[in-house]
Structure formats: C-alpha cells, structure tokens
Image (spheres, helix red, strand yellow):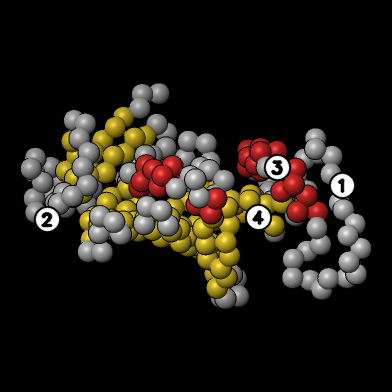
C-alpha cells in the first residue's frame, strides 16, 4: 500500500490555495510539498498507511527522552485516571516505549479517561497528555492484544516479573517478616495480575521552559477515518 504524506497548515485567514477543508473552513489548506515548521503558522505532518499517523509531538518527546537519558528518573511519569466511582487516582509509572509503529504509550501495571504529566528536569520540558487507556489483562478476548501482553511480559526483567507474584497491594501485611521469596519459571507466560496498558493520546500540551514556547497538539478524525493531528502555538 502506498504511503501518503500530507501537510496541514492552520492560519488565521483564508488558505493560500482557497481550498476548503471538510468543514468548509478555508483556514485549513493541504499541500503536498515537504515542509515542516512550528511558529506563526502551525504545520503538522500526517503520514498514513491504513490507520497509522505521524504526530509531530512524538519527535519532541523522543528528543526529550534522549537528552535526559542519563537521568534514571526520566522514564518515570505520573498517570492520573478517573475510576468508575468518579474518584481520581494518580501514580508514578514507567515508560515502556511506544506500541510498535503507533503513537500509543506502553505501560505495565498490576491490576477511562486518563492524563499523563511528564517533566524532564535536564531539558526543562513538560508534556501533559490527555487520552484513553486500553487495559489488556488475561481475560481479554482479542488474540492480537494478548500477544502484545505476552511480548511485554517477556520484555520485562525477571525481577520485575516477580513483583506480580507478591501479595496484592494495599492489603494488610500478614507475612510476619518471613522473607519467603517467590519463585518463577523464566519461560512461564504472564501471571494473572499482570496487565498491559496502552495509552492512546488525544491531546498533547508541550511546554519548553528554556525557549519559553508552548504548543498544543490536538487530534481529530478525518472524513476518511484517519486520526490527524493539528498543532497550535499558544502563550506559555
């Protein structure tokens, strides 16, 4: 399948070609020539083959991870969720990479709307990401998702896997300090308590305190069913 690349430029007035977007708004213009810049005119690249898209906030995040790689805590971020009872919950989790060639952020956890807050102390960059969480546990009926869960399990260290054999979090400690260690066959698949979370971003708020710049990246679905991203430079 041919992979197409389009560029969408949002301006305050009429697009230079006069072409109308899906909503009839002439402020959205599509160009085929390769050009990308973030500034007075916000340009977003969309590359799609099937449903895959390229979001320009992703290179910013990867660059921040690279420039802060010498700091062990750079892969830690705060994940906030709202439970079915309406109560908010916040915890620190570890970035496990992106799910294959998608924009979905991978997180491993012990047994839906969510928000991520991620600050890089070395480069002074902050990412606040809103999106939806897909929880994949052993009861999931999707065979492909179960394969992703198993892949994530074996990608974790044996020490990390052993944590999922420990007593359930926040229950009373009845071990009496016995110090008994759990045993796990390295070739054994995911245990019941292991869940894979796939966070699908819908909006990214990027702030760079060194350059004093801030961009809001917002996704929407096109008439063709593709997820496309628009960017806007805003006041810090």
Give the label, 2 or 1, closer to the camera. Answer: 1
Which quarter of the picture shows residue 176? bottom right
Q: Which residue is mark 4?
A: 109
Q: What residue sits 42% from the left and 57% below the top?
A: 121
Which quarter of the picture shows residue 50? top left
| Residue 61 % position (x, y) | 40, 47
Q: Which residue is mark 1?
A: 183
Q: CA distance from mark 4 to mark 3?
A: 14 Å
Q: Is label 2 in contact with label 1 (beta carbons under 8 Å)?
A: no
Q: CA distance from mark 3 to mark 1?
A: 14 Å
Q: CA distance from mark 4 to mark 1?
A: 20 Å
Q: What residue sits 40% from the left and 23% below the top?
A: 1
Q: Which residue is mark 2?
A: 12
Give the label, 4 or 2, closer to the camera. Answer: 4
| Residue 43 % position (x, y) | 22, 44
Q: Which residue is mark 3?
A: 157
| Residue 66 marker | none
Element marked by disc 3:
loop
Q: Earlier in the sequence, mark 3 or mark 1?
A: 3
Q: Label 1 neighbourhood size at 10 Å, few (<14), some (14-19), many (20+)?
A: few
Q: Earlier in the sequence, mark 4 or mark 3?
A: 4
Q: What residue sits 48% from the left and 35% below the top?
A: 101
| Residue 161 % position (x, y) | 74, 47
């Amino acid at each position: 399948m041919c992979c197409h690349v389009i560029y969408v430029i949002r301006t305050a007035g009429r697009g230079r070609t006069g072409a109308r977007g899906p909503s009839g708004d002439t402020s959205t213009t599509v160009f085929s020539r390769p050009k990308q810049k973030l500034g007075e005119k916000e340009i977003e690249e969309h590359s799609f083959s099937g449903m895959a898209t390229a979001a320009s906030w992703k290179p910013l995040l990867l660059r921040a991870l690279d420039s802060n790689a010498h700091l062990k805590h750079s892969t830690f971020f705060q994940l906030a969720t709202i439970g079915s009872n309406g109560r908010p919950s916040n915890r620190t989790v570890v970035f496990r990479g992106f799910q294959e060639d998608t924009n979905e952020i991978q997180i491993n956890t012990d047994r839906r709307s969510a928000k991520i807050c991620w600050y890089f102390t070395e480069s002074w960059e902050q990412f606040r990401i809103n999106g939806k969480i897909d929880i994949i546990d052993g009861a999931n009926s999707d065979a492909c998702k179960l394969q992703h869960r198993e892949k994530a399990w074996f990608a974790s260290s044996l020490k990390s896997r052993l944590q999922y054999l420990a007593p359930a979090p926040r229950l009373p400690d009845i071990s009496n300090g016995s110090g008994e260690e759990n045993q796990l066959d390295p070739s054994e698949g995911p245990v019941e308590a292991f869940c894979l979370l796939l966070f699908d971003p819908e909006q990214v708020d990027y702030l760079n305190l060194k350059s004093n710049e801030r961009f809001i990246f917002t996704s929407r679905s096109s008439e063709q069913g593709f997820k496309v991203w628009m960017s806007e430079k805003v006041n810090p």
